[in-house]
Image (cartoon, rainbow, N blue to C red):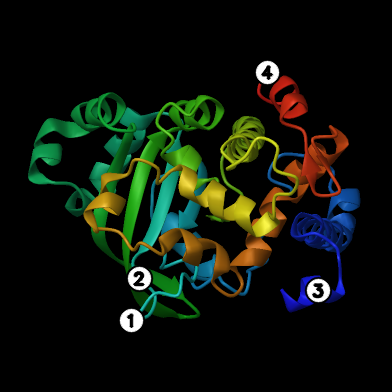
Amino acid sequence: MAWTAINPVSAATRARATASSHLQHHWRRHRRILRGCPCTPHARWSSTPAAAQLATNKELSAIVEQFPSGIDFSFGYGSGVLSQQQAGGPGMIDAILAVDDSQAWHAQNLHRHADHYSLLARTGGPRFVAWLQGNFGAKIYFHPFVDIDIPLDEKTAHREIKYGVVATDDLISDLMHWDYLYLAGRMHKPIVPIGNIGEAARRDEIEEAQRANLRSAVSASLLLSESADQQSFAIDHLYNTIASLSYTGDFRMKAGAEDPDKVKKLVETPGMRDLWDEKYVETLSSLQRLGAWKSGKYALAKLSKGWLQR
């Protein structure tokens, strides 16, 4: 109240100015990235470790190298890969492997890592595992609590990992259409791509699908804002809304089985904000070019006609 008394600028105007100033600072900071980006697939997925990254790129690559060929794309995520203010130190390393031929890949992996599979899966064989993967849940076959030894700096390091296997076509479909909003929701948030593997054409398809996924995330978050005539939308609030999309309706949040501050930690943990900025700089710049966000103001009509119909 005291600030308002000496400055008649309304709270809404101050909020607009704050959001606009932050965005201008954010875009100036990343202008060199945008100008230098050739806009080729995977070019914006930097291999430079961020301050919030716990597992090194070398470590993640060494883990993926333990698995058979045929992986089109892989990424690490979770509290063992990126800091989330967790207690007790880094957790299990989580990874997703997108493969071109699920049955053929599981056949190789069963031969190499039979102990990663249950007795039922080993008995049923690769065809059975691929059937389970493609017909239940979000079409991902997870291997939890896997102990793995990896070579690091002329020594062997022990890690506990959880890895999920998904068909590349199913990953692309979820990114494009939000079939399950599982991997799409995971890839709304910062992740760490692992290596430069797979065929370039498949990586191109995944990158294009991810662009659509990020546009959809921003569009949905703006449309879910509290008021349709809201004059400003702080970037922090935008990121928090995006992070919460895949947790909406998650029974774990209602049952207390998940950290109630998880969304906040995903955005506000030191070092994570830079990853969010880097992830969404191109999408937000496109939003500005469309006229859907002008000096902190966005037009829902333009947004729905422009992006949601693409």
Decide if residue 235 is on the left or right side of residue 116: right
Disc 3 residue type?
Answer: Ala
Q: Residues within 10 Å of mark 1 (few under 14, many from 20)?
A: few
Front position in the image: 20 or 170: 20
Instruction: Give the residue number, with chain letter if any, for mark 1.
Output: 88
Disc 1 residue type?
Answer: Gly
Q: Which tag, 4 or 2, sits closer to the chain's start?
A: 2
Instruction: Give the residue number, with chain letter if any, for mark 2.
Output: 91
User: What secondary structure is found at the residue carrying circle 4?
Assistant: loop
Q: Which tag, 4 or 1, sits closer to the chain's start?
A: 1
Instruction: Give the residue number, with chain letter if any, for mark 4.
Output: 309
* Whether residue 227 is situated above or below residue 131 in the rendered picture: below
Q: Position of residue 153 (x, y in %)?
A: 50, 80
User: What secondary structure is found at the residue carrying circle 1?
Assistant: loop
Q: Position of residue 296 (x, y in %)?
A: 80, 49
Q: Residue furthest front?
A: 5
How far is mark 3 from mark 4, CA to CA? 46 Å
Instruction: Give the residue number, with chain letter if any, for mark 3.
Output: 5
How far is mark 4 from mark 2, CA to CA? 40 Å
Q: Which tag, 3 or 4, sits closer to the chain's start?
A: 3
